[in-house]
Amino acid sequence: MSHVQRRSRGFDRRDFLSLVAGGAMTMGLPARLALAAPVLRQQQKRCVVLWMAGGPSHLETLDPKEAVAGAVGSASIATAVPGIHLSENLPELAKVMDEVAIVRSLTSREGSHPRAQHLMQHGYLPMGGVKFPALGANVCDQLQAAAGALPGYVRIGGGRVYNGGAGMLGVEYAPLGVRDPSRPPDNTTAMVSGDRREQRLALLDLIQANFGAAEGADRVAERRQLVNAAEAMIQSPGMEAFDLAQESSAARQAYGEGRFAEGCLLARRLLEAGVTFVEVVQNGWDSHQDNHKQVAAQCAQVDRPASQLLRDLRERGMLDSTLVVWLGEFGRTPKINARGGRDHYPKAFSAWLAGCGVRGGQVIGATDEQGAQVIEQPVSPKDLHQTIYAALGIDADYENTSSTGRPIRLVDEGTPIEGLLG
Amino acid sequence: MTNSPQSARLRVVAIAFGSLTLLLASATSATEGVDSSALSVARQVDQVLQQLPENRAAQFAPLVNEAAFLRRASLDVVGVAPPTADAQQACAAGDAAVTPQRRRAIATQLLEDPRFGDNMARYWRDAILARRLEERARVVAEPLVKDLAKWINQNDGWDEIARRFITAEGSTDEDGATAIIMAQDGRSEEIAAEVSRVFLGIQIQCAQCHDHPWDEWKREEFHELAAFFPRIGLRQRRDTRPPVFDVVVNDRADRPRFRKADNANRRGRPEHYMADLEHPEEPGKRMTPRFFLTGLEVSVGTEDAERRAALATAVIENPWFTQAIVNRVWSELIGYGFYPTVDDLGAEREVVAKPALDALVAGFEANGSRLKWLYETILLTDAYARQSRPRDEATAGVMTATVAQPLRSDVLFDTLVQVVGVAREEDRRAKRARAQQGPRERLAEVFGFDPSDPREDVVGTIPQSLLLMNSPAVHRLAKARPGTPLAELIAQHCPPDGEANHQAAIQELYFTVLTRKPTAEESQRLVAYLESSARWQPAYEDILWALLNTAEFSHRR
């Protein structure tokens, strides 16, 4: 049936693998394992990005400062790892500190939201004429994501403010946005029977042929691809992954309450269903006013679910193959402004990583006693991207080709953060 | 980025071709009594394109027929597909290329329709608010659409409209001209960047923190531009919900306590200070307001009204101002611009068919910088009336074909409403459920895009497909139940006590949804489908579903 043709490279790879597996039966077990193992291992790798939109204050989260107590809105607390302290806003993360590597020495020059977000999401600043793929799109492409009928890349929460998508890789690598994690994605409950849908798709093919012949060949091809993907998704048993009601109440309670908590739980379910890259977005970190209260409230939304996600992945044996990254686009000014807020500050900020070969229980880099200057092992956004690709076993020098034929590496500068992995 | 060699080549070529030089001369002297009517300028543009050396070997796409022209122009001008009766009439003209007389008649009629202003105003609402720093800036959307639609319909010049935005004061829920200031949260640096991007098509904001890596703009020049805007602030009114803001002006002496390097300038400060990157805690350097393109300078201490008025005049008199709007409208109507990115122009940028742009610019200025004139002129060009081609193909030559474009969300919404209607109950329920968010806004959440983004970057998404394929709302509206347009159509052509004329019914559906006749094959196969179905109603629903889910329906062909 032409309208359910499967075009994604993921499917090709899966078909290829099943062929390989079938053929290998005659080879004997060790040979078979040797052939399939590297590919399979790579396929199993996954990534979750917990995206803190707006720029979280490093001082009231991952980089607390004792010395300037008056200017810092939260005390610091000890963690499960002796010698490492976090803000009291993150008591749950403190308990799983042995899984987590904190980077306190991120530094960049981009102090406006759109540019800084673009840099953190793509590894590049925006540049006219080049459609950079977002990190998630590159990861799905590189890992040959095969999630069945579910998209390889799902973005939970956020909204239109948050941009970034497949770029030059094309619509099949675009993220599926899920605004409300407590419900299945909009319009995924079939309105008519399966037979009738088949009929309708055949009629659609008939009517699209006219515009598709010359004038809108590209637009019709895109529409076909999207309709097929949407149809495959609606029919897929994998859609159950979106149903949080299938979780026990204990599991739900462990993640806590709120959209972000539901988002983290949904992320875990989607990873289990074969999705490769999940973003969970928490808006509201842009604390220009009343910073201390706002950051504390944000942490209360984020701390428990993020930590529980790590625990949950560990218990399910998935953490070793799942990279979890918590980050925003920049930090906040060490100085409190006239409205009790902190303004944008890209010069020094923090992030954390866990799983997938990240050596937990350590701190990379340091800032001075105001949290104003990086004084040890500076890490650029591009270094961070190099690190993420390295952890996922992806060659960051791989070149995509832009629409004008220009080769664009996944990341063009930087090196993986020393000492973070392994 | 590599424009200079190309434009130099164009100039050389212009000298080589006598007729072209003549054309250029007539275009540039439009103000001196030369005919700068829409029709005359449209002809000049077409001649320039025909004679471009890049196009000598190119195959120009044929002109569309009248029905396709009507659909295209309706979607572009009034933001909705033509009604069934008009579509039927246009289809009767057959497959021959649309005549110049009909093009002119259609353009004139559409531009007199007040929905032209609404359509334009919604475009600019999206262009301005897509870059908002603050969610609360949505409060200005309604007054912006109302005011701008009025100004455009009464044919105010684009220069006067721009002046209102640059010099706005007052309440954001009453005065639409406050939109840029509101969207940029009253911050002087961000407002300066937006004024430059929106009205001049020049992106200078990259120079905010450092000298621009590949443009000529220097960090100082950016902050000198920001220095036109320090005295305005945005003040939230007490106890208003949704929040209402006022653009207020603070003309005070430059006391040390007002000197700040950070740009969160929502209260208004006497002067703008450029942060010292090495010492961000210091106030930084006091900047004299100076316009980077002309060197116009206003002294420190000048009152706000005078500062912004001086800048507004300098902006609207600058050549980039008209180039930016002409290039933007052309790009919207043809599918791609002379400059490829509508808000990233400048001497360093690549440009094609510059003489055609120059002819339009001269005509636009000679005709009072009015958008209606610009739309009419472009609608009268052959370039506009050509068939569309996929972007890669169309851009192989220079404007040898148009490019199909996804409909903006408002246009899709209004066209959907026209085709299947919108149940009032749905509207009301939505309003109750989510304050002020009706079906139009919810569609925009899925289909909305920033119209300044290069259109090739605006790709379809799975949620968009799901909404048209499988949403309860569209499903309900496209059903053949009593009261829906589909049920009426079936009743008319297939009366219970008479003979069913499926062919006529299908034809009418095509007029309504796609503004064209079904092809012979479509007609035959759809009639066969209806005849093979046990019940007509569901089969008609299937056909309407298929029509609505085509790329043809949701694109401007």
Image (tube, rainbow, N blue to C red):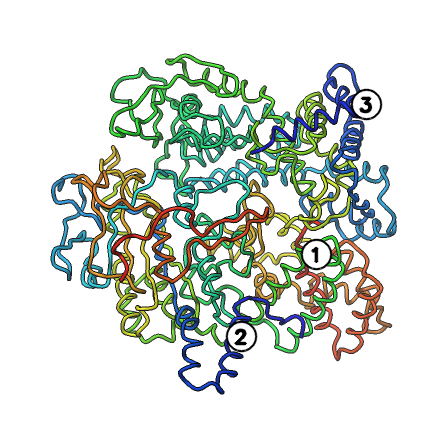
Q: Which mark is residue A16?
A: 2
Whole-percent x and y of residue B89? 84, 50
Whole-percent x and y of residue B363? 72, 24
Q: Secondary structure at mark 1?
A: helix
Mark 1 or 2, nearer chain start? 2
Q: Would residue B376 appear left or right of B264 to someone viewing this image? A: right
Q: Secondary structure at mark 2?
A: helix
Q: Secondary structure at mark 3?
A: helix
Q: Which mark is residue B18?
A: 3
Same-subunit check for callouts 3 and 2: no
Closest to the camera, between mark 1 and mark 3, is 3
Measure how far apart labels 3 and 2 are at the Cα level: 62 Å
Q: Would residue B239 appear left or right of B139 to someone viewing this image? A: left
For residue B226, above or below residue B484: above
Residue visible at 73% across and 43% down in the picture: B73
Q: Would residue A388 appear left or right of B8 to someone viewing this image? A: left
In the picture, the quarter occupied by the N terminus of chain A is: bottom right
Measure how far apart labels 1 and 2 are at the Cα level: 29 Å
For residue B503, above or below residue B188: below
The residue type indicated by label 1 comes to: Ala
Whole-percent x and y of residue B100? 85, 37
